[in-house]
Amino acid sequence: RIARPTQTHTRIDSSSSKMLTQDQLQRYEQDGFLVVKQLLTLSECQKLKTTVDRLIDDWEPEQDYSWMFPHGQTKERSMDQELIDSGDTISFFIENDAVDPQTVQSHRDSTYILSEPFKAVGIWIALEDATIENGCLWFIPGSNSTTTKRRCIRNPNEQEFNDGKVLIFQGEEEYDDSAFIPVEVKAGDAILIDGQVVHKSEQNKSPQTRQICAFHIFETHNSTYSKENWLQTATSFPLLYDD
């Protein structure tokens, strides 16, 4: 099922700005990720969680969802062009397995979202403590020094694209599983993630949830969002700031 966006606003008023030190910048460039302690207060984390809970409680799926994929057809239908072109109109996906403690396979964000030259950072904010037991992030430090060899792109073959095979993978990458290190964080901590760094999360093996808020920022100055990316929007992405 795919739900259309619901308009909501949660205002976060941090009392102090967060500026990275030179040492933090160097660690980020070296490791490909950086933990920023207490980017949000516990009160702000709770405000975001409460807003999400309210949206879920108020949601009426019979009125809002647009498609329901029969069992066995989800993968094929998910490649439908209309779905791929709806990056700015889809609010969220609901799957039968969404509530299960699934593993997020090792990957680089640049495999799926690329700019040329690549200038992107992921912002991953823990709204609850993230531990090894409940599925914290794992990283290969320094893997951002190499670029991705694997890309998920829109199929350039027009015939295959029109027949429904709109996404394809190009290239292969293998990662040394022993090189990953866990990064446990407290509620309110943020992790800055270089788009080239290899990361993953393991299964949540605990009864504790691990709610987060995550988004990506692209530098648009002298950089172009790739038209090969699977995610495209009818309008430009909103600007974080404008010089």
Image (cartoon, rainbow, N blue to C red):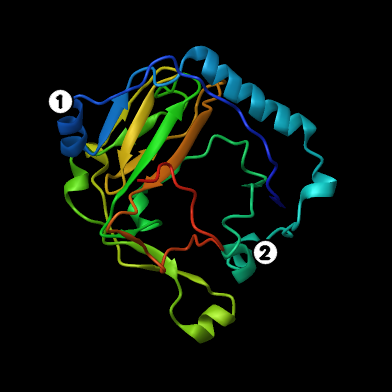
Q: Position of residue 180 (x, y in %)?
A: 26, 36
The amino acid type of the residue labelled 1 equals Asp
In the displayed structure, does residue 116 sit left or right of residue 13?
left
Element marked by disc 2: loop
Q: Residue furthest bottom?
A: 159
| Image marks 1 and 2: residues in contact by CB distance under 8 Å | no
Position of residue 213 relative to residue 229, above or below, is above
In the displayed structure, does residue 171 sit left or right of residue 203?
left
Dividing the picture into quadrants, the one containing residue 169 is bottom left
Position of residue 222 relative to residue 105, above or below, is below
Kindly identify which numbered label has been placed on residue 73. 2
Residue occupying image coordinates x 45% and y 47% = 239
Q: Looking at the image, how many numbered discs can be counted on the residues? A: 2
Kindly identify which numbered label has been placed on residue 23. 1
In the displayed structure, does residue 174 sit left or right of residue 54?
left
In this rendered view, identify the residue nearer to me: 45 or 181. Answer: 45
Residue occupying image coordinates x 64% and y 47% = 91
The amino acid type of the residue labelled 2 equals Gln
Residue occupying image coordinates x 57% and y 57% = 87
Question: How many neighbours does mark 2 have within 10 angstroms: few (below 14), some (14-19), or many (20 or more)?
Answer: few
